[in-house]
Amino acid sequence: MKKHLIASVLIGAFGLLGAAGAHAQQSAATTDAASSSGYQVPSAELAQVVDAKLAPRSMLSPDGKWLALLERRRVESLQELAKPELKLAGIKLNPDNFSRSRVRNKYTALSFKALEGDVTIDVANLGEGILRSPQWSSDSKHLSFVFETPKEATLWLYDITTRELKQLTPYALNSVVTSTPYEWMPDASGVIINHAVNIGKEQPKDNADTVVPVIQQTTGEKAPARTYQNLLTSPYDEALFSFYGQGQLMRVSLDGQAKAIGKAKLFSNFSISPDSNNILVSSLDEPFSYQVPYFRFASTWSVWGMSGYELKELVKQPLADNIPQGFDSVRTGPRDFEWRADKGATLVWAEAQDGGDMKKDVPHHDFIYTLSSPFKRKPSLLAKTERRYSGFTWGNDNVAMLSEWRFSDRNVRTWIIAPNNADANPVLFSDRSYNDAYKDPGNPIYTYNDLGVGVMQVIGDRYIFLRGNGASEQGNIPFLDRFDVKTNTTERLWRSESPYYERVVALLDDEGRRFITIRESKTEQPNIFVRDLDEDTLVQLTQFPHPYPAFKGIQKEQIRYKRDDGVELSGTLYLPAGYDASQGPIPVLMWAYPLEYKDKSVASQVRESPYEFTYIGYWGPMPYLAKGIAVFDDPKMPIVGVEGQEPNDTFRKQLVASAQAAVDVLVEKGVADKDKIAIAGHSYGAFMVANLLAHSDLFKTGIARSGAYNRTLTPFGFQGEERNFWEGQAVYANMSPFFHAEKINEPMLMIHGKEDPNSGTFPMQSERMFAAMKGLGKDARLVMLPYEAHGYQARKSLLHVLWEQEQWLDKYLLSDEASE
């Protein structure tokens, strides 16, 4: 029986810590939102949601014997976000420890649970710091992780056999450009690290003697670029970027012995060949750009031996500041380098045949090339794709998946091929819009091959296993399938059954009869199980408790309805605990996000399960159930382009029609008072809020977070819009609520992080929208959160956001004033 499994299992679930008593005391005397200052705390029911504890992240060992459980650090302190950081080439970095400063996945504790028996191991003596970038070795003997302190990041190992924790090497790691600063050798003999060679050295100085004018010159060639933030702005920035980004690759054995590999460079990528003998490296080259982030800088791709000797220079990629406009446009020349996972040392890459522009009419948009060790022959043509190449899923010599896509119709097509003869009898595995969830065949299940590399699990060169969400008109019904490559047929082995929502994580055998799942229900927190189909057993491995006991009793219903053009819509209605239909209509908070489609039927699809656990996260609308407000979560707001039109050609009309349909169905059900409905959203959802307040009278008030309101400030496209401003001035103007601020006659709360680096949602978007509303005498409030980015992380910030929203809803949705 094969035990090798893909190494990571992710679950997102919550555990409750409970609100501190101080929260209730602080919120007992609530002040009016318009006159308050400083950070505030919401009512206790809302505050406890911020302090809820997520279930651990789970990572399954390759041999299927151990689960590593990593406790998440869910929120940050404001002091942590306030620490000095540099903003260079599209990266925010911590200059003290040569790491990125806004890493999301951070962990504070580590434990292990055996799949067989009751053995649990709690790892002690971790010290003060955070864990990140955990990885299992391919032989399942070690779990590695980066241990980060304010002054440095180092690599640590836990030996599951000896139960020993140790720091593998004293060398500080550099994760400024290479965000994951180490990689296991596939044979598990050691790791390659990116050492921060400049840590402890004095950074370059900037003074009047070295300052020079910053001069940029166009070339006459089109160079469209989205509105990036945190770019380089001066020669001094360039010097800092080189200083902090420079690293030295080192090979470190399991006993901690380290040996340098080649010379120090500004590495942007490094990857070890499956046979553990070669390294694919990419390093950034000067001159740098002030117009695009680091990942579009000039770079050199090479293959090195383990001593650092260059075996083959693959390409010198020029600065990619002139990529044609379009989501499926790419740089010219060789790109997308990777090792073929099922071979010892074989490289694969793509080259555009259309100048990087998918709008050009050519027989094949990409050629795929391959080159094997010792890298002395000419590259071989592996395959041609009619559309844009999007990647391989490797299995073995006889079975692999090749995918290609096209943005114009959102189409993605996947072929099953024999890599050694890719043109011979390819099997069309899937051909669909990537928005078409109902036709999603699922994703292959992975295993580890004899080289120690993750590949698609292939049985007898014939069968592969697929797991998927199983989207349907009844909601998501996850499944496990076996696909026969020879006959191009699928056999369903298992599917989730109500009243549970259960999905496959990994296989424990070669027949698809025994596997690990995550199982939940409306009222039961997700936990990990082992399901055996032959024995008809289900064994629970974890016992994560219900995280929100204060919110038990919430009612959940998936609602289907239509808008006036016949497009079917859906959303999830949550009613407060104890709600009874006899009490009549109650205030409603809608939280939504528009999406673009090219097909009406696809836009109507249901993509949720009615049996999923009800999360009460601090991010969305759910906490306000505690205030007796009904929540209509994710009512679909599809923007559909049909009959030759682009979706955004009729954005406003479709948006208002979707909102009207959502309001109507809630009123018809007797749940909502049509005069007491609020609309809210984040990012593009905030853009939606402002548009709905400007172009309809459906809502009493709106909450818009981290949004963009003036599309002329994003002139080279936004969201799914490919036309630039000069090609679609009317569309940009019609869609920009800033241009229609005089029509907004409902109060709007705007919240934005002052350090938002997201393309298109610069903080000035909210500042200028507020200035417009203030100048026009509108009712608006703007909250700028210090140190926060596009998503908010600090505990103080999150509590304050909940308070702002609570006060706003109290005043404009729940109070007698809101009824006038």
Image (spheres, rainbow, N blue to C red):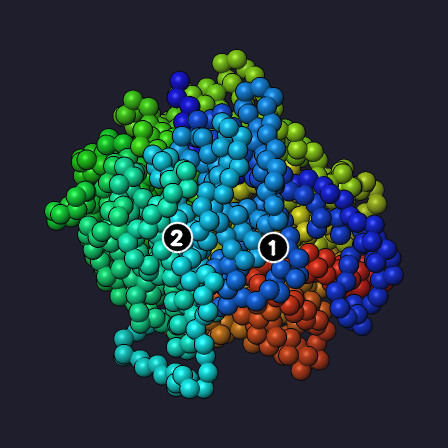
Residue at (26% x, 60% y) in the render: 300
In what element is the residue under mark 2? strand
Q: Quadrant of residue 529?
A: top right
The residue at which mark 1 appears reads as 592
As drawn, is 623 to the left or to the right of 286?
A: right
Quadrant for the C terminus in the image: bottom right
Residue bearing mark 2: 194
Q: Residue at x 68, y 39 (%)?
A: 15
- The answer for how far apart the CA atoms under marks 1 and 2 are is 42 Å
Q: Is residue 242 visible?
A: yes
Question: Is residue 503 depicted above or below 27 in this figure?
Answer: above
Residue at horizontal 30 percent and vertical 51 percent from the top: 261
Residue that appears at 27% across and 79% down: 220
Type of the residue with mark 2: Asn
- Foreground residue, 534 or 665? 534
Above or below for 168 versus 696: above
Label 2: few (<14), some (14–19) or many (≥20) C-alpha neighbours in 10 Å = many
Mark 1 Cα shell of 10 Å, populated few (<14), some (14-19), many (≥20) = many
Hey, what amino acid is under mark 1? Ala
